Amino acid sequence: MRSVTRRSRATEDESQPAAVDKLVEAFERLLSQGESFTTISVEQLSREAGIVRATFYLHFRNKGELVQHLMKTVERELRAAAAQSLSKIDHFGRAEFKVFMRRAVDIHFLHRAAIRAMVEVSAYDSDVSRVYQEFMARQASDTRIVIEKLRAQGRAHPAATPDLAEILAWAAERSITQMLKDDDLGSRRHELADMLTHMVWSSIALPQAVPKESA
């Protein structure tokens, strides 16, 4: 009989047990060392985390749930970056959006191995695929909110439709995932973020709403 203390789902609490943090760090570390999702065993993962195998199953049913947990972590970090850069500014512009995009690229870089694993696993794991699709749907929804804020201020591009928000969210995510390299320095990450800022901001804001930036 299984222990009644076993969790059927990974907790979504902000305050995670130390064992979960160790598993997350070990998983990302193994992935960054060249291991793939399919080759990492629960035994190997537990050993890397410095815990017993049974502890893994106290928090996750399988590795797919660990990936789901990681993506929810990424989403929380992205939302926090957006709140810090955009939500508290009544009349944000391109400069503030660039700050957010640089933070977003840095977050993707930090979790790049886990995000790659999620994309890989989503091809054959329906639960992870659902999490991935929901993750992207919320990114598109957040882009729509930015467009609506600009529209309320009379600064939205007339072609900035709800469907465009979804296209931009996918274009940004795919560009970041495909173009980020493991050895990219901060300057290269900022370069990528600035190109994405140009792409997205030029698509959603009126041209006259783009301020002249200092070098």
Image (tube, rainbow, N blue to C red):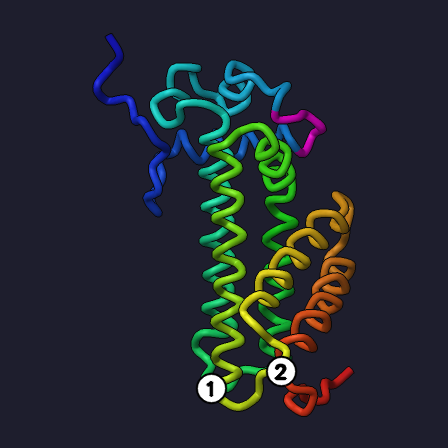
Q: Element at badge 2?
A: loop
Residue 152 is marked as 1
Helix, strand or loop status at disc 1: helix
Q: Provide the major secondary structure of the magenta segment.
A: loop
Query: What's the CA distance linking mark 2 and mark 1?
Result: 12 Å
- Region of the chain picked out in magenta, as a range: 32-37
Task: Answer with mark 2 or mark 1, whichever residue precedes in sequence.
Answer: 1
Does the magenta segment cover residue 93? no
In the image, 163: left or right of 8?
right
Question: In the image, is residue 9 above or below residue 104?
Answer: above
Q: How many marks?
A: 2
Crowd band around label 1 with a 10 angstrom C-alpha radius: few (<14), some (14–19), many (20+): few
- Seen at 50% across and 32% down, the residue is 126
Residue positioned 58% across, 61% down in the render: 166
Label 2 belongs to which residue?
A: 157
Residue 163 numbered mark, or none: none
Q: Residues within 10 Å of mark 2 (few under 14, many from 20)?
A: some
Quadrant of the snapshot with the C terminus: bottom right
The three-letter amino acid code for the residue at tag 2 is His
Residue 198 placement (x, y as % from top left)? 72, 73
Quadrant (top left, top right, bottom left, bottom right) of the N terminus:
top left
Three-letter code, disc 1: Ala
Query: Which of the 4 quarters of the picture holds residue 162?
Result: bottom right
